[in-house]
Image: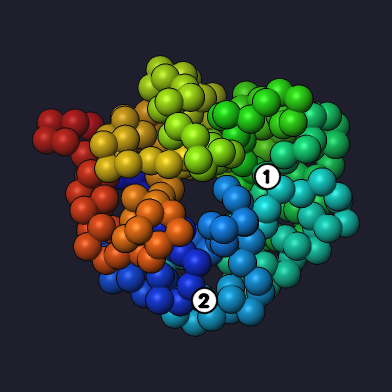
Amino acid sequence: MLMRLLVSVASPDDAREAVSGGADIVDAKDPGMGALGAVTLVRLAAIRAAVGSARPLTAALGDLVDEANAESQARAYAQAGAGLVKMGLLGTTSATHAALLTAAAVRGASTGASGVVVVAYADASAALSMSAAAVIDIAARGAARGVLLDTLHKDGPGLFGVISPRELDLWVSAAHDAGLLVAVAGKLTAMDLGRVRDSGADIAGVRGAACLGGRSGHVSRALVEALLESCAPTVGSH
């Protein structure tokens, strides 16, 4: 299966550029609110209208620490048209609590025929978040659809400044063994996409690399097209 390119968008204009550039998945989030900043439901509806049925739409929910909020947030964003919703666990270091949060989000998302992707931060302190390995187990036990490995600090190094390609390979393999969809992000550049593809990840997510002006700029069709070329398998690869 070919790796798909996910482009995070903050507006309907961003979404149209992502679609016209050939992005496989459009992801709604507010980059000004951190790694998993959630757009408003009004903004999500506008992005949904811009994308239409042309591409799958996903949405960030933020880092969730309350079960009732996790369920209601997942339900609202799923019913607004997000086929997958991404939830972080920053602030949760208890596996039991993390499992309850995941189960609550899955319940909420299921009412909108959506699934949940649980996010692990490769650069987060163990005092603030679950380990990437623990997130795989939590997602699998909680019936989440998938996992995402990302970076929390967008002013720091990218993913490969935090972990090695070999560590990524092992994490992706473990997540696949658990039956999960696997996405990878974290300030990825065009040069990083080949390494992510070679890890076996199903999805590579970008924001800054697809934007004129970086993460806080605007998505560019031309940049998305160039990133897609970097995602393509090399001649002779399998």
Q: Secondary structure at mark 1?
A: strand
Hey, what amino acid is under mark 1?
A: Gly
Percent position of residue 22, x then y: 28, 63
Q: Which residue is mark 2?
A: 48
Hey, what amino acid is under mark 2?
A: Arg
Percent position of residue 40, x then y: 65, 71
Outermost left residue = 235
Question: As displayed, is residue 62 above or below residue 136?
Answer: below
Within 10 Å of the Cα at label 2, are there few (<14), some (14-19), or many (20+) other Cα atoms? many
Q: Residue at x 41, y 57 (%)?
A: 7
Q: Secondary structure at mark 2?
A: helix
Question: As displayed, is residue 25 above or below residue 36?
Answer: below
Asked if residue 220 lies left or right of residue 135, the reply is left
| Residue 116 showing in the rendered view | no
User: Which residue occupies the foreground of this view, 68 or 210?
Assistant: 210
Q: Which residue is mark 1?
A: 88
Asked if residue 106 lies left or right of residue 177, the reply is right
| Residue 93 showing in the rendered view | yes
Q: Residue at x 22, y 62 (%)?
A: 222
Q: Quadrant of the N terminus?
A: top left
